């Protein structure tokens, strides 16, 4: 999985702590000492997916485009990594001894089937958890996280 997925998830959580405020990619990147240009690519992908909105200009930046409870973790993963399955069966069994050209080995192969089953479980888990769920867990672990995040951004020198 692309490291940008992690960065995008954390950025979405942080944006929840400063609602209604557009935050630049530079400022979001500074929070975790990430490369601004690379994080900006992830934020742009989230914008194209309708997860974030972006505003240009001196007061511009990124903010959530919809409520955090409407953004699943799978939405973020798909926005960053694409909708393609992680496992792609190339049907190598067709080249093996005794192979039959008429068989769709994606459906017959036990490796393919096991990988597809695991991918389905993984996607269901991500689809069932929202950014709001993550925010709730962060607050349970650190009740000061929202205020600390707001203060950090408020005190950051552009």
Image (tube, rainbow, N blue to C red):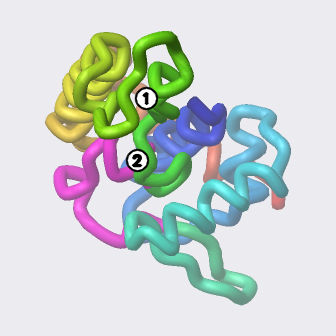
Give the secondary structure at mark 1: helix
- Segment tinted magenta in the rendering: 63-78
Q: Is residue 15 left or right of residue 59?
A: left
Determine crowd level at label 2: few under 14, some 14-19, many 20+ residues with C-alpha closer than 10 A. some
Q: Is residue 135 visible?
A: no
Mark 2–mark 1 Cα distance, whole angstroms, equals: 8 Å
Give the secondary structure at mark 2: helix
- Can residue 73 be found in the magenta stretch? yes
Q: Which corner quadrant of the image does residue 125 belong to? A: top left
102 above or below 39?
above
Q: Position of residue 80 (x, y in %)?
A: 54, 51
- Mark carried by residue 145: 1
* Residue name at image x 34 percent, y 52 percent: 75
Observer-nearest of 98 and 65:
98
- Residue linked to disc 2: 17
Is there CB contact under 8 Å for labels 2 and 1? yes
């Amino acid at each position: 999985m692309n490291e940008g997925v992690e960065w995008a998830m954390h950025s979405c959580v942080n944006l929840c702590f400063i609602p209604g405020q557009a935050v630049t990619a530079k400022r979001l990147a500074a929070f975790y000492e990430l490369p601004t240009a690379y994080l900006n690519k992830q934020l742009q992908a989230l914008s194209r997916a309708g997860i974030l909105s972006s505003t240009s200009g001196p007061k511009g930046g990124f903010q959530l485009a919809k409520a955090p409870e409407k953004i699943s973790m799978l939405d973020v993963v798909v926005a960053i990594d694409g909708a393609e399955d992680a496992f792609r069966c190339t049907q190598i069994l067709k080249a093996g001894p005794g192979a039959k050209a008429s068989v769709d080995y994606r459906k017959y192969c036990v490796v393919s089937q096991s990988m597809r089953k695991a991918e389905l479980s993984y996607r269901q888990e991500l689809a069932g958890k929202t950014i709001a769920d993550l925010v709730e867990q962060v607050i349970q672990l650190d009740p000061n996280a929202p205020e600390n995040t707001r203060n950090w951004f408020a005190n950051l020198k552009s």
